[in-house]
Image (cartoon, grey):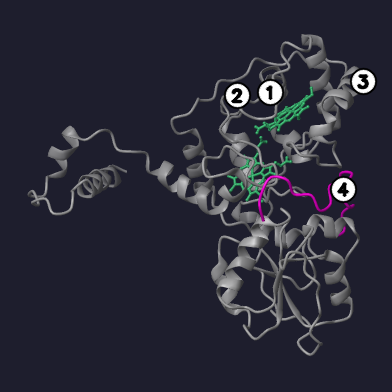
């Protein structure tokens, strides 16, 4: 550690040299350390870089959220004050299956080691409010009264255990496993400044807030899921039905192909390539049969696709954001026939089109009414 800090100090000193100025004799590390400000925490810089690579496309470059998929802010004051490091780190590691939030942990097939996740948490916390344990919940709520209040005041944004609306899915088993009653209560009382989540502390009585917490808790108190054993890296043939005819697709805006056309082409054994642009952990859990894994943050994987006019389709859960990055990259490289599968994999699954993966046998998530092809908060 001491060596790393000394190196950082030297590096900082070197980069502050201006071009053309006479080069001063190299300072000895000891002399320099006496005048330099305390060196930055190296985890913060690493965490920031990882966040830009993997997370910014939804949560935004500053982690304020709402760039795609209604991804929440990760830096609102009340979130950082009430969420402990375990809540944040395990949310990143495990993700929220069946939402756009993938599991990024290595053991799930994602790209991040425990140390990488610690770096991201360090960056999120850097120069921002620190964790203060929220006041304990009373445990005296009435779940039945809470259910009625939830249906009228919360459900339209937060959905229920089987249906995600636009905001964080409070009925999600992984969320409920990680969130304490005190965390839930604090979020309801103080809200999340600079987001659509208002503070209900003045509008509702303490009893009503306890009732809401009791209702959320009645959905589930699952144990925190253990990390599963490591999984192999996905491999497989690239081109599906190499002897089949080329499909003919009608694209919307020269970019989007409806799921129904893709399902029909697969049934007719047409020749095409399907790219899953999410982290490999999501690919392992649920994919279109035969889709290859090229995560949006590693577009070099495109090298393995033949650039010979074969149709190449990309999808994500977003439904357009990560897949759009891959399609842009394909077009930049001169691929002739490319498209984004319009509604994304969650819609595909809801329609009952074929899927494979470890989660393929699980009950279908319900689509929120009218949610299919809507995608409000980004431009692709
Ligand atoms: C494809 C979009 C997308 C990407 C990429 C993404 N997230 Fe998320 N993230 C979401 C959404 C959407 C949610 C809320 C899920 C839900 O409905 O509960 C979420 C939830 C979270 C939460 C829980 C927040 C809370 O209030 O409960 C954390 C922490 C988080 N993401 C961190 C990350 C980090 C770190 C990365 C990168 C390694 C990342 N996310 C990448 C979309 C994304
Ligand atoms: C207008 C939409 C809307 C309504 C209505 C709403 N919320 Fe929220 N809520 C949100 C959003 C958006 C977030 C995430 C904010 C962020 O951090 O970006 C949130 C966050 C939360 C969180 C914290 C989740 C986390 O992981 O940080 C809790 C708990 C919560 N809301 C409970 C409720 C309850 C209970 C009600 C009803 C009394 C309610 N909300 C009403 C939009 C809403």
Q: Secondary structure at mark 4?
A: loop
Q: Label 3, on which residue?
A: 144
Q: Label 4, on which residue?
A: 367
> Would you identify the image quadrant in which residue 262 lies?
bottom right
| Discs 1, 4 touching: Cβ within 8 Å | no
Q: Report the image quarter containing ligand 2.
A: top right
Confirm whether the magenta stretch covers residue 370: yes
| Discs 1, 3 touching: Cβ within 8 Å | no
Q: Look at the numbered disc 1 and say if its residue's Cβ is closer than 8 Å to ligand 2.
A: yes
- The disc at residue 68 is none
Q: Secondary structure at mark 3?
A: helix
Q: Is residue 230 visible?
A: no
Name, please, the residue furthest toward the front: 253
| Discs 2, 1 touching: Cβ within 8 Å | yes
User: Distance between the Cα atoms at labels 1 and 4?
Assistant: 26 Å
Eye-nearest disc, 1 or 3: 1
Region in magenta: 360-380
Please tell me how crowded label 4 is: few (under 14), some (14-19), or many (20+) other residues with Cα within 10 Å: some
């Amino acid at each position: 550690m001491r060596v790393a800090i000394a190196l950082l100090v030297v590096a900082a000193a070197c980069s502050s040299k201006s071009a053309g100025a006479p080069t001063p004799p190299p300072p000895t590390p000891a002399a320099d350390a006496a005048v330099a400000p305390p060196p930055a925490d190296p985890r913060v810089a690493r965490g920031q870089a990882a966040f830009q690579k993997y997370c910014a496309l939804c949560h935004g470059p500053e982690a304020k959220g709402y760039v795609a998929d209604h991804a929440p802010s990760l830096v609102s004051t009340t979130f950082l004050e009430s969420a402990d490091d375990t809540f944040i780190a395990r949310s990143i590691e495990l993700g929220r299956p069946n939402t756009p939030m993938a599991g990024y942990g290595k053991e799930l097939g994602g790209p991040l080691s425990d140390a990488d996740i610690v770096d991201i948490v360090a960056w999120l916390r850097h120069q921002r409010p620190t964790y203060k344990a929220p006041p304990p919940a009373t445990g005296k709520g009435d779940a039945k009264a809470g259910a009625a209040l939830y249906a009228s005041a919360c459900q339209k944004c937060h959905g229920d255990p089987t249906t995600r609306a636009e905001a964080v899915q409070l009925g999600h088993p992984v969320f409920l496993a990680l969130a304490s009653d005190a965390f839930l209560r604090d979020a309801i009382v103080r809200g999340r400044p600079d987001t659509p989540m208002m503070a209900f502390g003045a509008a509702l009585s303490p009893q009503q807030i306890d009732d809401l917490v009791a209702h959320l808790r009645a959905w589930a108190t699952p144990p925190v899921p253990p990390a599963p054993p490591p999984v192999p890296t996905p491999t497989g043939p690239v081109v599906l039905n190499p002897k089949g005819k080329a499909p003919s697709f009608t694209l919307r805006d020269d970019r989007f192909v409806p799921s129904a056309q893709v399902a029909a082409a697969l049934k007719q054994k047409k020749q095409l390539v399907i790219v899953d642009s999410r982290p490999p952990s999501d690919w392992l859990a649920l994919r279109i049969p035969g889709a290859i894994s090229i995560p949006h943050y590693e577009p070099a994987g495109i090298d393995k696709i033949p650039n010979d006019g074969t149709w190449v389709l990309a999808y994500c859960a977003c439904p357009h954001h990560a897949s759009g990055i891959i399609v842009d990259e394909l077009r930049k490289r001169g691929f002739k026939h490319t498209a984004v599968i319009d509604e994304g994999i969650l819609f595909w699954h809801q329609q009952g089109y074929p899927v494979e993966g470890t989660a393929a046998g699980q009950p279908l998530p319900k689509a929120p009414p009218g949610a299919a092809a809507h995608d409000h908060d980004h431009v692709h």
